[in-house]
Image (cartoon, grey):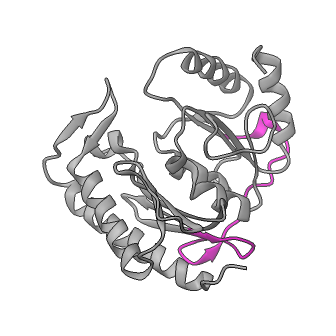
């Protein structure tokens, strides 16, 4: 049992997420300065300001907690609590003024997800979850879809910045599932993608080349909404894996079988 009340942890996470989203939305209409970490991997002034705001708010309540954040990396104090932060998921979308993008804050306790907050923008929606207590969107309970067949499903995927072997593998899967489902969407913000599956707007999500901060909040929201989560080989998923599959309970095994029939490296 966590020695800190879950409600207190959630309230701080929500406060930090909303404060960061306000900063991002205020910057949306202004000229955006973008630096390139890689060929297409952008980082903006807003990323840094959002992250600093999140960490400042959390530290004001929990000064001894660890952080793993996209821009500042690992900050370890030896605590059993670790906040995993993506201050602006979907930076490329933000830079172009294109939806969707998000703030993602996941709290792990003893290496297990405990609290999660994702703020989807620009049409602000607050997703949240607490371990064993459920998942919510704007304070209302959410649950995943009940689509029973792959053929009737709507799926979501994403593509990493590096166009190597994993990108090629995913393109093969993208083509396959575009042909065999009702569609595959690519929004460009993994935290939002996962929340859309958790809330039943889509039936499944897969992606390669994700980082821990991309999924740390989303996986708890999805799990609490009834989703099944694994890596793409069907094994238990870690936020440190390089691939993930999240679906409703009815199509998970079916998707795994199709993925295995297409990929030769599983």
Left or right position of 213 against 250? left
Outermost residue toward the left in this view: 31
Residue 106: x, y in percent? 54, 62
Q: Is residue 13 magenta?
A: no
> Which residues are drawn in magenta?
128-154
Visible in this render: residue 199?
A: no
Residue displayed at 14% across by 53% down: 30
Q: Is residue 152 magenta?
A: yes
Q: Nearer the viewer, residue 220 or 256?
A: 220
Residue 72: x, y in percent? 34, 51
Residue displayed at 28% across by 41% down: 43
Query: Is 27 situated above or below 252?
Result: below
Residue displayed at 20% across by 39% down: 34
Outermost residue toward the front in this view: 78
Q: Quarter of the image for the C terminus: give it.
A: top right
Q: Nearer the viewer, residue 188 or 43?
A: 43
Left or right position of 226 against 191? right
Residue 174: x, y in percent? 62, 24
């Amino acid at each position: 049992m966590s020695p800190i009340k879950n409600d207190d942890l959630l309230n701080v996470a929500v406060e930090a997420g909303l404060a960061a989203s306000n900063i991002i939305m205020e910057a949306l209409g202004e000229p955006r300065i973008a630096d390139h970490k890689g060929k297409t991997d952008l980082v903006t002034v807003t990323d840094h300001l959002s992250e600093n705001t999140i960490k400042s708010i959390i530290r004001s309540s929990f000064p001894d907690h660890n952080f793993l954040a996209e821009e500042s990396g690992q900050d370890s104090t030896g605590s059993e609590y670790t906040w995993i932060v993506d201050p602006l998921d979907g930076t490329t979308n933000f830079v172009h003024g294109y939806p969707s993008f998000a703030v993602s804050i996941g709290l792990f306790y003893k290496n297990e997800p405990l609290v999660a907050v994702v703020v989807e923008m620009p049409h602000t929606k607050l997703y949240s979850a607490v371990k064993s207590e459920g998942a919510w969107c704007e304070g209302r309970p959410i649950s995943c879809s009940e689509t029973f067949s792959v053929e009737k499903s709507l799926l979501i995927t994403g593509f990493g910045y590096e166009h190597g072997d994993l990108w090629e593998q995913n393109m093969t899967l993208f083509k396959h599932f575009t042909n065999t489902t009702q569609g595959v969407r690519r929004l460009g913000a993994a935290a939002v993608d996962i929340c859309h599956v958790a809330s039943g707007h889509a039936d499944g999500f897969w992606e390669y080349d994700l980082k821990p901060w991309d999924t740390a909040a989303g996986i708890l929201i999805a799990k609490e909404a009834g989703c099944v989560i694994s890596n793409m080989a069907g094994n238990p998923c870690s936020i440190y894996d390089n691939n993930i599959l999240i679906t409703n309970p009815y199509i998970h095994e079916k998707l795994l079988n199709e993925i295995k029939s297409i990929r030769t490296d599983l």
